[in-house]
Amino acid sequence: MVFGAALLGEATAQKLGELGLQPRAISDNNPERWGRIHGGLPVVAPDAISHDTPVIVASKYVKNIYKGLKDKGFSCLIPHYVLPLLFPENFASDYHVFSAGSVRASCMKIAKALSL
């Protein structure tokens, strides 16, 4: 199961599928996404997931989502940022692209704040 029905969740589900680890669905906290198809997979509510199902949290809000799911009793949570360590040849380039955009945006905000 992949948690996060946005670009990162879709990319994660796709890469897992390429490795033969096809997720059955994507979950998300946004009820407007439940029942839709995202990246070829159905989007389900968190309550539809068994608490012992392995869940890869693939969102820029990974820390808050991880904590929320843990507090609900989920026992097998995997933050997306460990995937490049487990499968460097499959995940490193995609995650570095996402990270580079975040770093660039942060640098621009810092420069603006410091009027540089």
Image (cartoon, helix red, strand yellow):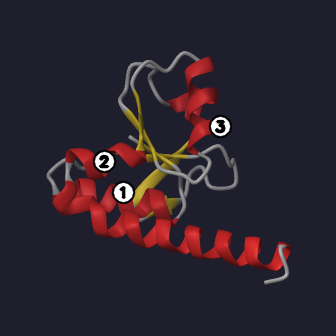
The answer for how far apart the CA atoms under marks 1 and 3 are is 19 Å
Residue 23 visible (yes or no)? no
Q: Earlier in the sequence, mark 3 or mark 2?
A: 3
Residue at disc 1, secondary structure: helix
Q: Quadrant of residue 12?
A: bottom left
Q: Is residue 20 left or right of residue 62?
A: left
Q: Which residue is mark 1?
A: 12
| Amino acid type, callout 2 | Leu
Which image quarter holds the C terminus? Answer: bottom right
- Point out residue 102 in the picture as x, y percentages from the top left corner: 58, 68
| Amino acid type, callout 3 | Asn
Q: Quadrant of residue 104?
A: bottom right
Q: Earlier in the sequence, mark 1 or mark 3?
A: 1
Residue at disc 2, secondary structure: helix
The answer for how far apart the CA atoms under marks 1 and 2 are is 9 Å
Label pair 1/2, CB-CB below 8 angstroms: yes
Q: Which residue is mark 2?
A: 83
Q: Which residue is mark 3?
A: 64
Q: Is residue 67 left or right of residue 96?
A: right
Nearest the camera: 43 or 94?
A: 94
- Point out residue 15 in the picture as x, y percentages from the top left corner: 27, 60
Q: Between label 1 and label 2, give the one nearer the viewer.
A: 2
